[in-house]
Image (spheres, helix red, strand yellow):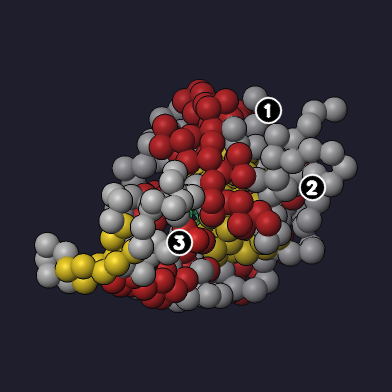
Amino acid sequence: MYSNPNGSGPTAPKKVTAPDVRARKGGPALAMVTAYDFTMARLLDEAGVDLLLVGDSLGMVVQGLANTLPVTLDEIAYHSRAVARAAARAHVVADMPFMSYQVSSTQAVESAGRLVKNGAVESVKLEGGEDFAEHIWRIVRAGVPVMGHVGLMPQSVHSLGGFKVQGRGQDAEAKVLADARAVEEAGAYAVVLEAIPPDLAAKVTASVGIPTIGIGAGPQCDGQVLVCTDLLGMGRGHSPKFAKAYAQLGDAVVAATRRYVDEVRSGAFPAEEHSYKPNRAAESGPRVSEPSERGQGRVVNLRH
Ligand code: KIV
């Protein structure tokens, strides 16, 4: 019996495992959210999400890139370690970034192993269906649970001609279905369905025995995933059609920081309660306002 480093004793929550996720086919619905750092992951875990995804979307969200392609395995491992430290209950799954698994199934096993060893994750996710079934099979045989990802695969943005809804038309529908089935047959414990019509997502969900986790795939999936900054309203630009903001933290951050800036400039912060006890209480003297070099009033302590 191992103790959980994020909690101990009888009150420590039970970790969600890949088999637990697999067993949630048909309900209760799975809630997955992306996370890239300790602070956010701890809050999301406390809120009860089932899975934390260290997505390669960190290229856009954390690094300000236009797409996920430049993200490296080391970067995913670095962010995963921070997220894993915070996840007392949620299952931690990390994305395998572009060119960390596409070259060969051997490369895929090695990269997955590095994410488990260096990133402390509990499973990995990779984009691709039939074309990558062998890679999934080999990783699973090596002891690492795999989540598939079909439909819109952002690492293929250049061959898809942009971030576009997939699975429109008979052939494209059949391809998404075949991809999801191939992922299941290869041994994946769940599969993400990204940006496909809701009726196709329902069809896929009914025809595979593993949970489907949708993003832009409508309500008839076994779970949903959102990027944390979309969920919390922290983006300042375009928000995808499928994203729902449950708070406006971006506005809250800007408003709070404006108040801080104002208080620093006016001298209202730090107040006495934010300062340590002076060494010589009697000598520390009164706080008086005097003009700063820039000509604005500010509060100074005459002793410092
Ligand atoms: O990287 C990511 O955030 C993802 C989700 C969109 C599923 O893969």
Disc 3 versus disc 2: nearer the observer: 3
Among the two numbered marks 3 and 2 on one chain, the one whose residue lies closer to the N terminus? 2
| SS class, disc 3 | helix
* The furthest residue to the right: 10
- Residue sitting at x 78%, y 56%: 24
Disc 1 versus disc 2: nearer the observer: 2
- In the picture shown, does residue 120 fall above or below 247? above
Q: Are marks 1 and 2 in contact (CB under 8 Å)?
A: no
Position in image of residue 70 (x %, y %): 31, 42
Among the two numbered marks 1 and 3 on one chain, the one whose residue lies closer to the N terminus? 1
- In the picture shown, does residue 197 fall above or below 53? below
Amino acid beneath label 1: Gly
Position in image of residue 235 (x %, y %): 39, 68
Report whether the residue tagged 1 is closer than 8 Å to ligand 1: no
Q: Is 2 on the left or on the right of 31, as rendered?
A: right
Q: Is 36 on the left or on the right of 163, as rendered?
A: right
- Residue sitting at x 72%, y 48%: 89
- Please give the residue where the numbered disc 1 appears in the rendered image: 143
- Please give the residue where the numbered disc 2 appears in the rendered image: 13
Among the two numbered marks 1 and 2 on one chain, the one whose residue lies closer to the N terminus? 2
Q: Can you see residue 120?
A: yes
